[in-house]
């Protein structure tokens, strides 16, 4: 059974490797579906849109399998219908690049897609973290 969590918070800097002094990781969930988690993620992301040090991701958890979770990273995004960045543009689907074994690999892929679309105000990409069982 999969469960989904929204994980993140305010980080020390834009490397997003350690939380700001006095801040702790925030976990929202679990959610039974990815769409429910995506709505919660969107709410947190928009609530902190003006804070460059805040970041949230969706983590997928496999429960009751007995296997140790593995972390995979995905780059998700593309062209959206409007500046709410919640619905793909008509006739478009979001890209899902990965999985990547490390956050650094995902950041390189994200940077490539973000820079390739930097002049298109309706394009946006993000990194999603997924916890899975097995490698």
Image (tube, rainbow, N blue to C red):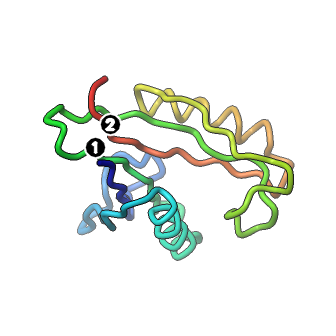
- Picture quadrant where residue 87 is located: bottom right
- Picture quadrant where residue 5 is located: bottom left
The number of callouts visible is: 2
Looking at the rendered structure, the secondary structure element under dot 1 is strand
Q: Residue 10 got which mark? A: none
The reply, left or right, for residue 2 in relation to residue 92 is left
The reply, left or right, for residue 72 in relation to residue 95 is left
Quadrant that contains the C terminus:
top left
Instruction: Classify mark 2: residues with Cα within 10 Å, few (<14), some (14-19) or many (20+).
Output: some
The reply, left or right, for residue 96 in relation to residue 27 is right
Q: Give the labeled residue for mark 2.
A: 132
Looking at the rendered structure, the secondary structure element under dot 2 is strand
- Residue drawn at x 13%, y 35% as measured from the top left: 66
* Nearer to us in this view, 130 or 115: 130
* Nearer to us in this view, 58 or 32: 32
Tell which residue pokes out farthest to the bottom in this image. Answer: 47
Give the vertical position of 67 relative to 63 (above or below): above
Q: Give the labeled residue for mark 1.
A: 62
- Picture quadrant where residue 12 is located: bottom left
- Residue drawn at x 36%, y 56% as measured from the top left: 4
Return the x and y of residue 25 as percentages of the image width and height: 28, 61
| Label pair 1/2, CB-CB below 8 angstroms | yes
């Amino acid at each position: 059974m999969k469960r989904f969590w929204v994980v993140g918070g305010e980080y020390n800097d834009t490397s997003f490797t350690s939380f700001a002094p006095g801040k702790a990781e925030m976990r929202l969930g679990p959610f039974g579906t990815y769409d429910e988690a995506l709505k919660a993620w969107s709410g947190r992301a928009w609530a902190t849109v003006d804070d460059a040090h805040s970041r949230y991701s969706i983590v997928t958890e496999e429960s009751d399998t007995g296997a140790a979770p593995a972390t995979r990273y995905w780059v998700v995004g593309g062209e959206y219908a409007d500046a709410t960045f919640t619905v793909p543009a008509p006739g478009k689907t979001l890209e899902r690049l990965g999985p990547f074994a490390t956050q650094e690999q995902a950041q390189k892929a994200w940077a490539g897609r973000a820079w390739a679309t930097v002049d298109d105000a309706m394009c946006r990409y993000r990194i999603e973290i997924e916890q899975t069982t097995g490698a």
